[in-house]
Image (tube, helix red, strand yellow):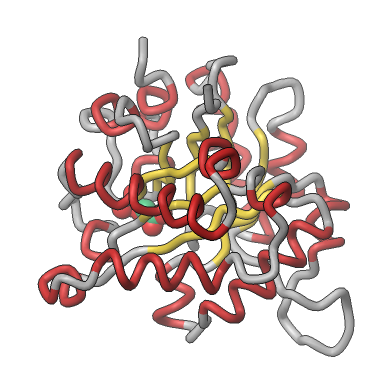
Amino acid sequence: MRRKIIAGNWKMNKTPSEAIKLVEELKPLVDNEAVDVVFCVPAIDIVPVVKACEGSTIQVGAENMYFEESGAYTGEISPAMLVDAGVRYVILGHSERRDYFKETSEDVNRKMKKAIEHGITPIMCCGESLEQREQGITLDWIRQQVKVGYQGIAAADAAKTVIAYEPIWAIGTGRTATTEQAEEVCGAIRQCIAEIYDEATAESIRIQYGGSVNAANAAELFAQPDIDGGLVGGASLKADFGKIVNYDR
Ligand code: PGA
């Protein structure tokens, strides 16, 4: 039985002092021992959020990371910096990073390897555009993103990672994929992992759905056999996140 993982993606929201306030507000609401709850926050919020989460079961994640150890990479954050600050997870290859910052699947693969080397669990995002869905190439595209993303990663390491399926047309639009669409692609991702590795790895890896997840649709999405939780943007900044985390209550 895979443990559900529900992660908030704060994106570029909340100053450090606002972040502490939000954690204080959400802390009593996201108490659910049965699921992994992760707050992925802007880099500057990591240190205060880790401190504010002390004494709770909330784990803290980053939204990005660079693939070098240290050096002349102005503006970047290294894996060791994240580990030292108390970070356990990192979102890699979010569609906003791929679109606006021109990150390629090869970049994502290098970051995946570095995160794993440092004991940080990557949450690797993949997802198709509306145009790709309409062209009927969704599954080909997702398989490509997954195959390149996991190149050179050992089965034992891959088994512990997380993949977030996020159709780009569903992100921040209020237009959630239907449960059938979400399950179809998450199932295809698991099948792809089985082809790259084996059944055991495919059964272990956790696959989230992301894209306009909210308190009203979370329970049905998370009940699907291949959906092991969610990556939540907008609704993770509100009390609603408590309802999403407690979707089964
Ligand atoms: P959304 O964002 O929940 O606001 O659609 C999801 C994401 O981009 O991770």
Q: Give left or right: position of 91 versus 82.
A: left
- Residue found at the far left of this picture: 134
Residue at 88% in and 84% down: 71
Residue 163 against residue 111 in the figure, above or below: above
Q: How many marks?
A: 0
Residue at 57% in and 63% down: 92
Residue at 55% in and 16% down: 34
Residue 166: image location, x then y, percent: 35, 56
Residue 90: image location, x then y, percent: 64, 55
The residue lying toward the viewer, choosing from 222 and 91, is 222
Residue at 69% in and 69% down: 152
- Residue found at the far bottom of this picture: 72
Q: Please tell me in which quadrant of the rendered image residue 228 appears.
A: top left
Q: Give left or right: position of 180 versus 241.
A: left
Please state, as top left, top right, bottom left or bottom right, where the C terminus lies in the image. top left
Residue 38: image location, x then y, percent: 58, 38
Residue 91: image location, x then y, percent: 57, 57
Q: Please tell me in which quadrant of the rendered image residue 136 appears.
A: bottom left
Residue 249 against residue 37 in the figure, above or below: above
